Image (cartoon, rainbow, N blue to C red):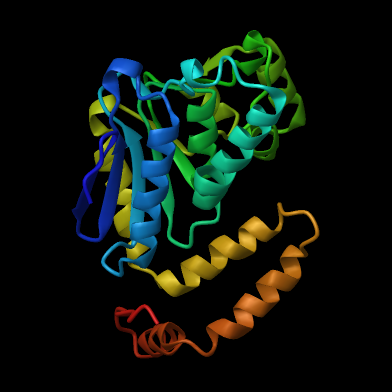
Amino acid sequence: MSYQNILEEIDESILTITINRPKKLNALNRDTIQELHEAFKAARDNDDVKVIILTGSGEKAFVAGADISEFADFSPKEGKKLAAEGQEKLFDYVANFPKPVIAAVNGFALGGGLELAMAAHFRIASDNAKMGLPEVSLGVIPGYGGTQRLPQLVGKGRAMEMIMTAGMIDANQALQYNLVNHVTDLDELLEFANGIAHKIMKNSMVAISAAIKSINANYEAGKNGFETEIEAFGRAFGTEDFKEGTSAFLNKRKADFPGK
């Protein structure tokens, strides 16, 4: 599929999606959110795709925020609709995606950009990355999950400070806060992310999908994560991947998971 604001590349079952609006520092607008939704939806149905790496074009920004010019004159009703649609189409969609999503954060990840990175299953940052949620400096609050996912990752106190001050933290501070898993040189960022993706793909993608769902259940209101885990654990015994994995272990050979 042809896109105007994103680029796609598949290599060895790893799909790299690059947000490509360099003149706008890859800021998210409605069209970009829609294209990202379509790209993720297609990846969900593509058996050749096992892991997604999400990044931004250039060296300056992953995503520098939302495109403010699009909603500066919105009414309260329009603002609520904007947040709800964005959550459904992209941020919640990525967070609950059944295949691993790695955010490779190059440069600025601010506002909606950090919210998108936090929606990914985990994050790797370049050493020049800077992250923050500056929405209160515009008289608004994070509306794409920032007030929920940031405290889950860094703790309530740090999230309160970051949001209230509208300040930025650098990559090393993000690592200290557990906001990112790794920090690497900018020119090694995608290679590092690909290395982790290859480690992931050695395992059962069926089991990984179930694990993603079980982990997420712990953070969803009204759901018992332990019950979700028990159900998923039981279902795993009926999969071909389980039969292959246990057989390979008992016969001291490398597993070749069929993905079923």
Position of residue 36 relative to residue 259, above or below, is above
Q: Please give left or right for residue 186 compared with residue 66 in the image.
A: left
Q: Position of residue 1 (x, y in %)?
A: 23, 51
Assign the C terminus to one quadrant of the image. bottom left
Position of residue 183 relative to residue 214, above or below, is above
Most foreground residue, 253 or 6: 6
Tell me which corner region of the image, top left, top right, bottom left or bottom right, holds residue 71: top right
Q: Position of residue 155 (x, y in %)?
A: 71, 33
Q: Residue at x 71, y 57 (%)?
A: 218
The answer to whether one can see residue 180 in this image is: no
Tell me which corner region of the image, top left, top right, bottom left or bottom right, holds residue 162: top right
Q: Position of residue 21 (x, y in %)?
A: 30, 25
Q: Please give left or right for residue 235 compared with residue 225 in the image.
A: left
Tell me which corner region of the image, top left, top right, bottom left or bottom right, holds residue 136: top right
Q: What is the count of numbered marks?
A: 0
Q: Residue furthest right?
A: 222
The answer to whether one can see residue 255 in this image is: yes
Most foreground residue, 116 or 240: 116
Q: Position of residue 68 (x, y in %)?
A: 50, 17
Q: Residue at x 43, y 90 (%)?
A: 243
Q: Please give left or right for residue 80 compared with residue 199 in the image.
A: right
Q: Residue at x 49, y 45 (%)?
A: 120
Most foreground residue, 18 or 50: 18
